[in-house]
Structure formats: structure tokens, C-alpha cells
Amino acid sequence: MRRVTVAALVLGVLGTTAAPASPVAPAGPPRPTGYRNAPDARPVRAGSVLPGPGTYTDSIARGETRTYRVRLDGSSNVFLSAVLAPPPGAAVDVVDGVSLSLRTASGLLCGMRADIRLYGDTARPVADYVSRRLEAGRDCQEAGEYDLVVQGVGRDGDAGRRRAWRWDLELGYVVEPAPGPDAEPPPPPPPTAWSTAPPADLGADAPGPGRAARGGTGFNDAAQLAGAGTWRDELRPGESRFYRVPVAWGQQLFARARFGNAAAPPGRSALPDGLRLALYNPARGAVDERRALYTGAPATLLLATAPAAYANRTEGTSDAVSAMRFEGSYYLQVSLDRQAPASVPLALDLALPSSSAATGHEGSGLGAGPARGDAAAPGPDPVLRAVGIAGISTGTVLVVSLAAWPLLASRLSRSRARTRPRGRHARGT
């Protein structure tokens, strides 16, 4: 449980004959804005046919299964995504989310499911996809009707604490032509080596004012960040902001989120996983995530990807590498815990160095805008990846007061369950 400090509210009573004045609510940061759907999204119901590429809206409840029919051809790769968007401030549980799968009409599973969970107790949009990739020897290669199955998941029991929920759901349907055996030029080999160390010029202009960027509420209104540099924004408690970054074939993305000095949590404790930096690919597939304690002190999170390469979808040596399979717009999501007492200044440093080993393939990019139309050596250092997934910045840990330890001990078992990035087992499909 989180440590909550309850302050007594003292009301003065004035001995007058006039009607008492209405109490004035204490000033605080404004409530975050909810997820904005695509302007051309079409509402659908369970059992509906998704007629083709585009975005669709529905809602789903915990314990509910909703099935949508999709008609696939025999010549395209298909990516079907789900964005679960609980309203800001909603009561959520660490395991709330949805399970996403693609099946034949007879129930055969096409690839693996995507497990999309909140992995925290702050409401924010979470997303991932399932896919049908055309390749000899794989299931689900035939043209025909398939089922997209979405299941609302969460903990049962203890009804007094586990609230029933029904949240907005946005479905994405993207296709890309499958490359033929005589594709010109042929797909290049996957990248074999790259550096996970950020380039020396990452955030080189950080001491200056930087460029202002107002992050969006999700994928559809994400702020465009065009290339390397530093952008500055501000996060309100319980808020997620999205930014769109174009990534070309062969480019790596280095993204560093620097959270400035802010108010300490109530009781001078710490908020586990209170700061988050996540990355999604152009088809809304989860790439990776970093997390850190929120203490009110400055903290830094860094994401470093493999070079974007078409061959990553078949030759990727990890889930995060496999997800770097497109060129186009990648999406950064930065989130602040709902129990943070005040807004936090944010600086985003970006670098996009190129690797020639991953270039040379002509394919359809997925990312000029919201994903709704036609669809593109060892992996990252395991030590860096492990530290990032654990989400605990050394600098942040050093400033945590002793009051945080009872809180952290009570959350230890939950934290262990959340160290694996969401949806990872769905990659490679």
C-alpha cells in the first residue's frame, strides 16, 4: 500500500447572520486530459466486422471477452493493435489490462497473444499488437475471415477493493505488402552490432532553454519531435504525454527523459515506478520501457534501441530488437504517478545515429501519422537492459529517505512482478 498522509481540514465558523460562504477547494494542478481517439475512428460492437485498415473504438470491462471479425487477404502482413485507455485518475490495479489474440474461425491461435497490462496503479494508456506475417511454414497464411479476440483481465475477489471497470478501447488495423522472393533490392541482413551508449552530443543543447513541446494524450495527437535535440515540457500528476519521432531504416533512437526538481511525495516517502518512459513502434507495438522512483529529486531515464531494420522481424535477437521492424513514426510516452503532489518539469533529449548495416530495403513505412492505413550482433547490452527494466536510477535511490523503506518492502512482491516490459511475449509473431 502507498503511504498516504491525511491532513486535517480546519474550518473557521464565523458568527454572523449571513449565509455561510461555500468552502473553497485547495488549489492544485489541473486534472490530466483523457485519451483522444483518432478523428476518423469508427465505433464498433463485439461481433462486428472490421472492414479494413483504420481505427475503431469500443469499450471493454474486466472479465469480458469481445470478438471482432477481420477479413485478411493472402498477400499482406497485418498488424492489429489495442489501446486500453482508462480515464485519468481512475482507480486501477497493477494487473488490470487486456489480452489480445488473433485466431482462425475454428479457434486456431495465429502467433502468440499480447498481454497488455497497466503494471502500476496510475491510469494511463497502454497498447500492443498481434500480427499475421506471411511466411512459409507459419499458420494462418490463407485468405479468409479471422477473429480478433480482446479479453478484459484483472484480479477477481475482494470486491470491496477490486472495483469493476469499463474503459475505452481503440483498435488499430494496419496492413503492409509482404515482400516477394524477387524483391528489388532484396531485404538486407539484420544489423549485427551497435552501441547502447548514448552519443556524446545527446542533449548537447540541454543547458539552454530548449524547444517547447506540448505532448499529446496518445498516439493520435502526439507532438511531432523532428530529429535530434532537446525538447521541454511539463507533466502533471497522473498524466501521460506522447511524442512522435520519425525513425528511418538504419537509425537508432536514443531518448533520455530528465525530470526536474519537484515537490516530495506526502510523508517524504517515495513512489515506486512513479516515473516512466515507454516506446511504441509505428504499429503501436510495445518496444521497451524504463521506470524510476519518484522522490521529488531530479531523475533520468534512458532508452536505447537497435537500428530499425526490416529483418528484425525475423532475425531479432530479443523482443525489443524484433519490435524495431519498421521505419516511420515511433511514439515516446512519458508518465508521472498520480500521487505526485505537483507538476514536474521535463526535458527530452533525442539522438538518431545511423547504422549502414540496416539500410537498403524498400518497403512501406508505417509512420507518417497515426497508424491507420497501409503499412515497415547481439542485441542491447544485457546489463543496461536489466538496469533499465528494474527502473531504479542509482542517483534517485541515493536520495530516498529512510521513510521510503517500509513502503518499498510492502511493494517488493508487486515490483518483481512488474519488471518485465508489458507485451514482451507477443513479439516475434
Image: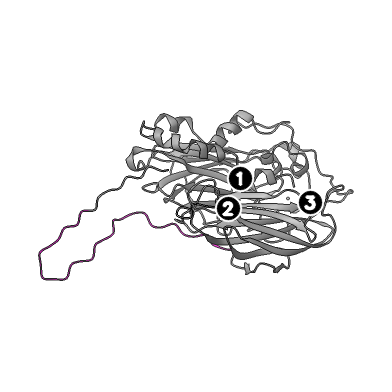
How crowded is the residue under tag 1: few (<14 C-alpha within 10 Å), some, or many (20+)?
many
Residue found 84% across the figure and 45% down from its top: 186
Q: CA distance from mark 3 to mark 1?
A: 21 Å
Q: Are marks 3 and 1 in contact (CB under 8 Å)?
A: no
Q: Secondary structure at mark 1?
A: loop
Q: Is residue 129 above or below residue 290?
A: below
Residue 367 coordinates in the image, percent (x, y): 66, 54
Instruction: Find disc 3 in the rendering and name its residue.
Output: 133
The label shown at residue 422 is: 1
Badge 1 vs badge 2, beta-carbon distance below 8 Å: yes
Residue 119 in the figure: left or right of residue 132:
left
| Residue at point 62%, 32% (across, down) | 196
Which dot marks residue 14? none
> Could you tell me the amino acid type at mark 1?
Arg
Count of all numbered marks drawn on residues in the image: 3
**Tag shown at residue 97:** 2
Would residue 37 be visible to someone looking at this image?
Answer: yes
The answer to which of 261 and 46 lies nearer the viewer is 46
- At label 3, the amino acid type is Arg
Q: Of residues 217 and 410, which is closer to you in this image?
A: 410
Q: Which residues are magenta?
A: 10-37
Question: Badge 3: how crowded within 10 Å, few (<14), some, or many (20+)?
Answer: many
